[in-house]
Image (tube, rainbow, N blue to C red):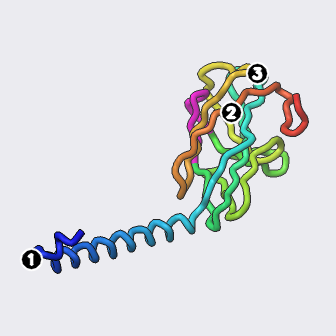
Amino acid sequence: MNRPARHPLHTARRRTAAATAAIAGALALGVTGCAGGGPELKVSDGYVPQPAMADMAGGFLTVKNGGDEADKLTSVSSSLASHVEIHRTKGRQMEKVDSLTVPANGELKLGRGGSHLMFHDLKRKPAEGDKVSLTLHFEKSDPVKVTVPVEAANFAPGQGK
Ligand code: CU
Protein backbone atom coordinates (compact mmCIF):
# COMPACT_ATOMS: atom_id res chain seq x y z
CA MET A 1 0.00 0.00 0.00
CA ASN A 2 3.02 2.31 0.40
CA ARG A 3 4.16 1.99 -3.15
CA PRO A 4 2.07 4.88 -4.55
CA ALA A 5 3.55 7.19 -1.89
CA ARG A 6 6.95 6.93 -3.55
CA HIS A 7 5.51 7.73 -6.92
CA PRO A 8 5.91 11.34 -8.11
CA LEU A 9 2.27 11.43 -9.21
CA HIS A 10 1.05 10.42 -5.78
CA THR A 11 -0.55 13.81 -4.98
CA ALA A 12 -2.22 14.07 -8.35
CA ARG A 13 -3.57 10.55 -7.98
CA ARG A 14 -4.97 11.32 -4.57
CA ARG A 15 -6.75 14.38 -5.90
CA THR A 16 -8.23 12.34 -8.69
CA ALA A 17 -9.40 9.72 -6.24
CA ALA A 18 -10.99 12.40 -4.07
CA ALA A 19 -12.73 13.96 -7.07
CA THR A 20 -14.00 10.54 -8.15
CA ALA A 21 -15.35 9.91 -4.67
CA ALA A 22 -17.10 13.31 -4.68
CA ILE A 23 -18.74 12.58 -8.03
CA ALA A 24 -19.84 9.13 -6.87
CA GLY A 25 -21.30 10.71 -3.74
CA ALA A 26 -23.22 13.27 -5.75
CA LEU A 27 -24.59 10.56 -8.02
CA ALA A 28 -25.69 8.48 -5.05
CA LEU A 29 -27.45 11.49 -3.56
CA GLY A 30 -29.15 12.16 -6.87
CA VAL A 31 -30.46 8.62 -7.11
CA THR A 32 -31.70 8.67 -3.51
CA GLY A 33 -33.49 11.98 -4.09
CA CYS A 34 -35.17 10.57 -7.14
CA ALA A 35 -36.42 7.40 -5.46
CA GLY A 36 -37.79 9.40 -2.54
CA GLY A 37 -40.38 11.21 -4.66
CA GLY A 38 -42.71 10.32 -7.47
CA PRO A 39 -45.48 7.76 -7.79
CA GLU A 40 -44.86 4.14 -6.77
CA LEU A 41 -47.43 2.04 -8.54
CA LYS A 42 -48.54 -1.51 -7.98
CA VAL A 43 -51.26 -3.21 -9.99
CA SER A 44 -53.43 -5.91 -8.41
CA ASP A 45 -56.81 -7.65 -8.47
CA GLY A 46 -57.13 -7.53 -12.24
CA TYR A 47 -59.65 -9.65 -14.11
CA VAL A 48 -61.79 -9.76 -17.22
CA PRO A 49 -65.32 -11.15 -16.81
CA GLN A 50 -66.17 -13.57 -19.61
CA PRO A 51 -68.13 -11.37 -22.01
CA ALA A 52 -71.58 -12.20 -23.31
CA MET A 53 -70.67 -11.22 -26.83
CA ALA A 54 -67.56 -11.77 -28.89
CA ASP A 55 -66.90 -8.19 -29.89
CA MET A 56 -66.43 -6.41 -26.58
CA ALA A 57 -65.22 -7.07 -23.03
CA GLY A 58 -64.67 -5.13 -19.84
CA GLY A 59 -61.68 -5.20 -17.53
CA PHE A 60 -61.15 -4.35 -13.89
CA LEU A 61 -58.09 -3.84 -11.71
CA THR A 62 -56.65 -1.74 -8.92
CA VAL A 63 -53.62 0.54 -9.20
CA LYS A 64 -52.17 1.34 -5.79
CA ASN A 65 -49.85 4.30 -5.42
CA GLY A 66 -47.53 4.20 -2.41
CA GLY A 67 -45.72 7.35 -3.54
CA ASP A 68 -46.30 10.94 -2.56
CA GLU A 69 -47.04 12.06 -6.11
CA ALA A 70 -50.15 11.37 -8.17
CA ASP A 71 -49.96 9.71 -11.57
CA LYS A 72 -52.38 9.11 -14.43
CA LEU A 73 -53.36 5.98 -16.28
CA THR A 74 -53.23 7.24 -19.84
CA SER A 75 -53.66 4.16 -22.03
CA VAL A 76 -53.75 0.39 -22.05
CA SER A 77 -52.61 -2.12 -24.61
CA SER A 78 -53.46 -5.81 -24.59
CA SER A 79 -52.99 -9.12 -26.35
CA LEU A 80 -56.78 -9.51 -26.31
CA ALA A 81 -57.84 -6.53 -28.37
CA SER A 82 -56.35 -4.04 -30.75
CA HIS A 83 -58.29 -1.24 -29.14
CA VAL A 84 -58.61 -0.66 -25.39
CA GLU A 85 -60.46 2.33 -23.98
CA ILE A 86 -60.56 3.78 -20.49
CA HIS A 87 -64.16 4.42 -19.40
CA ARG A 88 -65.78 5.95 -16.40
CA THR A 89 -69.37 5.68 -15.35
CA LYS A 90 -71.32 8.85 -14.92
CA GLY A 91 -74.79 8.26 -13.58
CA ARG A 92 -76.03 5.33 -15.64
CA GLN A 93 -73.94 6.23 -18.66
CA MET A 94 -70.38 5.33 -19.37
CA GLU A 95 -68.03 7.58 -21.23
CA LYS A 96 -64.55 7.33 -22.68
CA VAL A 97 -61.89 9.37 -20.91
CA ASP A 98 -58.31 10.21 -21.86
CA SER A 99 -56.93 9.30 -18.45
CA LEU A 100 -57.77 8.39 -14.87
CA THR A 101 -55.88 9.77 -11.89
CA VAL A 102 -54.01 7.49 -9.49
CA PRO A 103 -53.95 9.65 -6.36
CA ALA A 104 -50.82 10.02 -4.23
CA ASN A 105 -50.83 7.53 -1.35
CA GLY A 106 -54.09 6.18 -2.67
CA GLU A 107 -55.52 3.94 -5.35
CA LEU A 108 -57.38 3.93 -8.60
CA LYS A 109 -59.99 1.21 -8.47
CA LEU A 110 -61.60 -0.06 -11.64
CA GLY A 111 -64.69 -2.11 -10.88
CA ARG A 112 -68.26 -2.92 -11.81
CA GLY A 113 -70.47 0.14 -11.91
CA GLY A 114 -67.45 2.41 -11.90
CA SER A 115 -64.46 3.12 -14.05
CA HIS A 116 -63.30 0.22 -16.20
CA LEU A 117 -61.33 -0.84 -19.21
CA MET A 118 -63.21 -1.58 -22.41
CA PHE A 119 -61.75 -3.96 -24.97
CA HIS A 120 -62.96 -3.43 -28.50
CA ASP A 121 -62.24 -5.40 -31.67
CA LEU A 122 -61.42 -8.58 -29.77
CA LYS A 123 -58.92 -10.89 -31.41
CA ARG A 124 -60.74 -13.83 -29.80
CA LYS A 125 -63.60 -14.25 -27.39
CA PRO A 126 -62.12 -14.68 -23.92
CA ALA A 127 -63.36 -17.70 -21.97
CA GLU A 128 -63.14 -18.39 -18.25
CA GLY A 129 -59.68 -19.70 -17.43
CA ASP A 130 -57.91 -17.73 -20.17
CA LYS A 131 -55.19 -15.24 -19.37
CA VAL A 132 -55.05 -11.74 -20.75
CA SER A 133 -51.89 -9.69 -20.78
CA LEU A 134 -52.15 -5.96 -20.31
CA THR A 135 -49.64 -3.15 -20.49
CA LEU A 136 -50.69 -0.08 -18.56
CA HIS A 137 -49.19 3.22 -19.59
CA PHE A 138 -48.88 6.10 -17.18
CA GLU A 139 -48.10 9.77 -17.45
CA LYS A 140 -45.05 9.59 -15.17
CA SER A 141 -44.31 5.98 -14.26
CA ASP A 142 -42.86 3.35 -16.57
CA PRO A 143 -45.39 1.03 -18.22
CA VAL A 144 -46.60 -1.84 -16.03
CA LYS A 145 -47.26 -5.28 -17.51
CA VAL A 146 -49.74 -7.59 -15.83
CA THR A 147 -51.46 -10.82 -16.70
CA VAL A 148 -55.05 -11.09 -15.52
CA PRO A 149 -57.43 -14.05 -15.53
CA VAL A 150 -60.73 -14.31 -17.37
CA GLU A 151 -63.35 -15.03 -14.74
CA ALA A 152 -66.98 -16.15 -14.91
CA ALA A 153 -69.40 -13.52 -16.22
CA ASN A 154 -70.84 -12.91 -12.75
CA PHE A 155 -67.52 -13.01 -10.87
CA ALA A 156 -67.00 -10.36 -8.20
CA PRO A 157 -63.74 -10.08 -6.26
CA GLY A 158 -63.93 -11.12 -2.63
CA GLN A 159 -66.99 -13.29 -3.17
CA GLY A 160 -65.19 -16.34 -4.51
CA LYS A 161 -66.40 -18.12 -7.61
CU1 CU B 1 -67.42 1.07 -20.93
Labels 3 and 2: the sequence-earlier one: 3
Number of labels in the image equals: 3
- Residue type at mark 3 is Glu
Q: Which mark is residue 8?
A: 1
Task: Let me know if residue 81 is in the magenta part.
Answer: yes
Up/down of 115 relative to 150, above or below: below
Q: Residue at x 62, y 66 (%)?
A: 69
For residue 54, side relative to residue 26 (left or right): right
Task: Let me know if residue 19 is in the magenta part.
Answer: no
- Residue type at mark 2 is Val
**Which residues make up the magenta segment?**
75-84
Q: Residue at x 67, y 64 (%)?
A: 104
In space, the residues marked 2 and 1 are separated at their CA atoms by 65 Å
Q: Residue furthest front?
A: 2
Res 13 → quadrant: bottom left
Q: Residues within 10 Å of mark 3 (few under 14, many from 20)?
A: some
Q: Quadrant of the C terminus?
A: top right
For residue 62, side relative to residue 23 (left or right): right
